Structure formats: structure tokens, C-alpha cells
Amino acid sequence: MNGPVHTMIGLSTGIAGATLLSDKLPVITESPLGPSCFVIAIVSGSVFPDLDLPGRPLGFLGHRRLTHTLLFPAIAVVIMIMLKGTHIPELASIVRALLFGWIWGYVLHIIADLFQKRGVPLFWPVIPANVHLANMPVKYDKICLIIYLIILCYVCVTFGNLSYNILDFLKTSPSILIAVVIAIIEIKKSLFKSMR
């Protein structure tokens, strides 16, 4: 999957999750900035594994190797648990919301890549072989994105009063709009760059 597709999956899931699950997941609402941090982090987590592409900061690791395993999310979970009893609760709650969103975005990226022929070394270093669920060519990633968004919309409509929750959510966390605008600008840049 390409970057804009991973970004859209992260952004749409982040907004839906922060809107529908904020009352069920205290880690998102421990701080007033929590929902915004969650969405920003889920978008960054959804593109983090591809920092191993050639020419990027982690390109020396080789694509779809270390950054496409469950190692980084496991480390983030341990840090989240360690922050639970900290003496600075406000800062800890913001960091926990960031880590929680980042983990979700990272895992969404890995799941999306599982549907491509190359797969990912999910359980490295225990099992070094790549795991994949399907042999979908990269050229169909936008079709998969549309299917994912349709399913996500169905879940939102079925399990929550989305129109009320979004308005309520934006009132309590208006900084979410900044995260959405930044993500949309980045997606447009990426799309226009790939069309050239």
C-alpha cells in the first residue's frame, strides 16, 4: 500500500475511534488534548513502518523488515503501562493517548500490508518468515481503501449516533480540526506527486 492510503486508513480510523470510543476508552479522554493526540498519533503510526523505504531515515534497515514487525508496538505498550502510575498525571495522560494512537496506526499499517503478496515478517525474530493473507497487487490499494471506508462508515452508523458524537467531539476537542487539515494537505501533496 502507498503512503496516502495508509494515511487515509489511519485518519479515518482515528476520527471514528476518537468519536465513537472516547467514552469507552479512558486512555483517549484522560486529558482534554487526548482525542487530538490520539488522531495525530494514529496518522503518524500508520506511516511510521514505511520509514524503512530507501532514502528515508530508516532506509538502512531494508524495506519490510524490522519496522514491519510487532516489536515496536510491543515496546510502546510497555511504555504505556509504565506511565500508568507516574507522578505527572497530565503529561502521562497525553503521552499515553499519543502512544495508544501510534500503536493503533502502526498495527493498521501492518494489517494492510498483510494483504499484499510480499507480506510482513510479523513475528520476527522468533519466526523470520513473511506472513501474508492475500496476494493483492499494489495497484488495487485504492479499491481496498474504498472498501475499508465503506465498512468503517457502516460500523459508525450501526454502532453510534455519529452526527451527535462528531459535533460533541469537536466541541470538546477543536484542535482535532488542525490534525485533519494537516493530514488532508499531506495526502493531496502525495497524490499530486504520484500523478507526475
Image (spheres, rainbow, N blue to C red):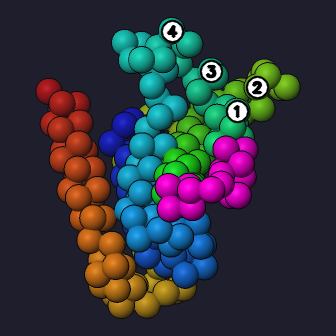
Disc 1 and disc 4 in contact, CB within 8 angstroms: no
Q: Position of residue 175 (x, y in %)?
A: 27, 64
Disc 1 and disc 2 in contact, CB within 8 angstroms: yes
Q: What segment is highlighted magenta in the picture?
A: 77-93
Q: Main secondary structure of the magenta part?
A: helix
Residue found 68% across the figure and 58% down from its top: 84
Q: Report whether residue 92 is seen.
A: yes
Disc 3 and disc 2 in contact, CB within 8 angstroms: yes
Residue with the mark numbered 4: 60
Assess disc 2: are there few (<14), some (14-19) or many (≥20) residues with their C-alpha within 10 Å of its C-alpha: some
Residue with the mark numbered 3: 65
Between 47 and 22, the one nearer to me in the picture: 22
Residue with the mark numbered 2: 124
Mark 1–mark 2 Cα distance, whole angstroms, equals 8 Å
Is disc 1 placed on a helix, strand or loop?
helix
Residue with the mark numbered 1: 71
Residue positioned most to the right: 126
- 88 drawn magenta: yes
Q: Position of residue 71 (x, y in %)?
A: 70, 33
Label annotation for residue 45: none
Residue found 43% across the figure and 38% down from its top: 47
Residue positioned most to the front: 87
Is disc 2 placed on a helix, strand or loop?
loop
Q: Residue 178, relative to residue 193: is it above or below? A: below
Residue found 36% across the figure and 90% down from its top: 164
Q: Earlier in the sequence, mark 1 or mark 2?
A: 1
